[in-house]
Image (cartoon, helix red, strand yellow):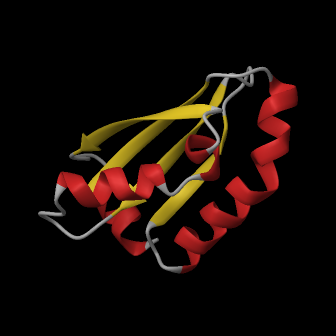
Amino acid sequence: MYVLAIIRYLKPLEEIAKHQDAHRAYAASLLAKGVIVASGPLEPRFGGAVLLRLPDGTPAADLFALRDGDPYVKGGAAQWELLPWNPVNGKENLDRA
């Protein structure tokens, strides 16, 4: 199962910067576990995007736990919009990543 997470900043970039190192460390830990396929800031920088790969049938509560573990969310600096995604074209490339 794939999920697109759109991260939208709720605070000015100066406030975002206070949480950035912890957020990036959190993302790196998810990448190391194979949960994140790719992530990074959007341009212009009003938020970011994350492509998550999780086992089929992952409960919504587990998605919410991933969201709520983000230091941006914990600090009230950003929110995640979670969009389950069923890629059709190119899925084999994602599955190899």
Nearer to the camera, 42 or 20: 20
**In the current view of this chain or complex, which residue is farthest to the bottom?**
33
Query: Could you say which quadrant of the image residue 14 lies in?
Result: top right
Q: Residue at x 39, y 62 (%)?
A: 94
Q: Position of residue 76 (x, y in %)?
A: 60, 34
Q: Residue at x 51, y 32 (%)?
A: 79
Q: Give the quadrant of the N terminus.
A: bottom left
Q: Position of residue 96 (x, y in %)?
A: 40, 74
Nearer to the camera, 95 or 26: 26
Is 53 above or below relative to 42?
Answer: below
Query: Could you say which quadrant of the image residue 93 lies in?
Result: bottom left
Q: Position of residue 68 (x, y in %)?
A: 45, 51
Is 57 above or below relative to 70?
Answer: below
Left-right relation of 74 to 60: right
Q: Position of residue 46 (x, y in %)?
A: 68, 22
Left-right relation of 57 to 18: left
Query: Could you say which quadrant of the image residue 48 lies in?
Result: top right
Q: Is residue 32 visible?
A: yes
Left-right relation of 27 to 22: left
Nearer to the camera, 53 or 17: 17
Left-right relation of 70 to 90: right
